Image (spheres, rainbow, N blue to C red):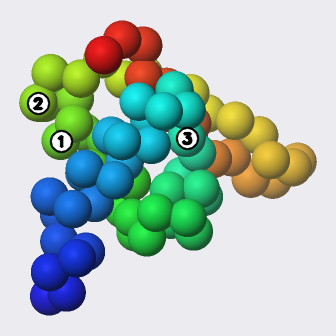
Amino acid sequence: MNQANNTQSQKRRLLEYLIEHKRITTLTARLQLDVMHPAARVQELKADGNNIVTFKRHVDNHHKVAEYVLLSQ
């Protein structure tokens, strides 16, 4: 496993992004942060005590993406 992309590194990148931007979509997490399973990382961040909520957003008539919002830090 690439040390720079292990689970802890992905969680750190995701949390840092959320702290700075307050929200992120699944697509952004995958494409910009190289987090291939954002839902799992978000669940882990929630288990660590972070207050993150998930919304489903329509991107067109047939597709939805998850948007994760950090409520407090």
Looking at marks 3 and 1 on the same chain, the residue that comes earlier in the sequence is marked by 3
The three-letter amino acid code for the residue at tag 2 is Asp
Residue 58 percent coordinates (x, y): 77, 40
- Whether residue 39 is visible, yes or no, is no
Q: Residue at x 74, y 53 (%)?
A: 63
Q: What residue is pinned by disc 1?
A: 44
Q: Residue furthest right?
A: 61
Residue 19 percent coordinates (x, y): 41, 30
- Mark 2 Cα within 10 Å, few/some/many (few <14, many 20+)? few
Q: How many marks?
A: 3
Q: Residue at x 59, y 56 (%)?
A: 28
Q: Compared to 60, does 66 lie above or below?
A: above
Give the distance between the C-alpha atoms of the residues marked 1 and 2, in whole angstroms.
6 Å
Q: Secondary structure at mark 3?
A: strand
Residue 68 percent coordinates (x, y): 49, 33
Q: Secondary structure at mark 2?
A: loop
Q: What residue is pinned by disc 2?
A: 48
Q: Residue at x 87, y 49 (%)?
A: 60
Q: Compared to 29, does 65 lie above or below?
A: above
